[in-house]
Amino acid sequence: MKHVAIIGAGPAGLMAAEAALSAGACVDIYDAMPSAGRKFLMAGKSGLNITHSEDEAMFRTRYHAPDQRLAGMVEVFGPAEIVKWMAGLGVEAHVGSSGRVFPGGMKASPLLRRWLARLGETGAQLHTRHRWTGWNADGALTFETMTGRATAKPDSVVLALGGASWKRLGSDGAWADILARRGVALEPFAPSNCGFIVSWSDRMRAHEGAPVKSVVLSVHGQYVRGDFVITRAGIESGAVYPLAAALRRDIAADGRAVLTIDLLPEADEAALAARLAAAHPKDSLSNRLRKAVKIDGVKAALLHEVTKGAAPRGPEALARLLKALPLTLTGTAPLDTAISTAGGVPWIALDDSLMLKALPGAFCAGEMIAWDAPTGGYLLTACLATGRVAGRAASRQA
């Protein structure tokens, strides 16, 4: 029987293990943490958004990768297939009002328990507290464990070690140095689905934690409707994440990015100007905004911040600003705080089966490959799809 090692017990690694087992291989799964799927569980703490029910063609456009291989993998194992896969575990899918797909009950833990149980029943062995350190001179995999150094010499290996965010959950990017020493040229890690830095005044920092609700954010013709949150250092969450790649590129090129905020997407500019013009002329600006267009609280604070307390009083100019408030971002939040990371193993380093060209018999899956996608079920879908491809290929290579 062929022997496949899976390093990393997140969704990509577990799916690779399932695919290899289905192909008849003997499978051992190794993870540095005390238990499997820690980031998977954290992602599902408030509801595991595992995929999305939108049109398949639109779904595939959510991914940023230098070629079409990732789109092809997601086409073969995408939302419909994930729903069927969950059903095979006895977990019904729930589609939210936004089209996002969750497991019944919303939580990740019941799904993970059933998945691990099925893997164990079909022969997979899970080895926790095994931190991969590379290969030794004999070509065996080496691990640091609680009892000392351990080795394993499988026929092939799937590396599913994640990106470089959320180190406390095991995704620390330490594998990059191991592969670099083996001749794999890597793309630098960058935060994705991350917060951004704004040079707030003390007045604005007083709104830390406040949600800015029902707005439209835009950059370079991309528009996202939703909410975001004020942090002490800037902004994060919700509607910010789908625009992160474009904002990150602007910051890398110019040292800054301008995010445009429509504070009142339900009203057009002309209607807002008319309502502002009809306000009592003796009202203060804050009262005009509150009474005429219902702008107060954190939205009023944002307007004050961007205009440095000198917002235009003319109704047309003020309405124009409410519909297109330019917020300058000066950097990304720290890498380890990002939900996901871009960069890692470039596609040019992989063949069509996700095997490393420089390391025959070693395959990659999940977030350690250089692709990018917003939250909304897209990240997990691609992790599962690439894990499936790598696990199947590893069992054939073995």
Image (spheres, rainbow, N blue to C red):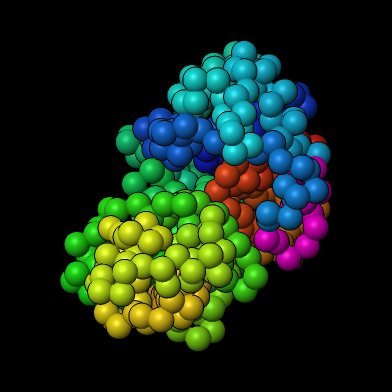
Quarter holding the N terminus is: top right
Where does residue 371 sit, x and y in percent of width and height? 64, 58
Where does residue 93 sit, x and y in percent of width and height? 62, 23
Question: In front: 79, or 269?
Answer: 269
Residue 144 occupies quadrant = top left
Question: In front: 90, or 397?
Answer: 90
Range shown magenta: 64-75
**276 sits to left or right of 86:** left
Residue 293 occupies quadrant = bottom left
Where does residue 210 sit, x and y in percent of width and height? 29, 53
Which residue does the image show at 62% across and 74% down from the upper left?
220
Quarter holding the C terminus is: top right
**284 sits to left or right of 252:** left
Q: Is residue 144 visible?
A: no
Which residue does the image show at 63% across and 37% down from the upper left?
99
Which residue does the image show at 70% across and 61% down from the upper left?
65
Where does residue 259 sit, x and y in percent of width and height? 49, 72
Vertical comparison of 191 with 331: above or below: above
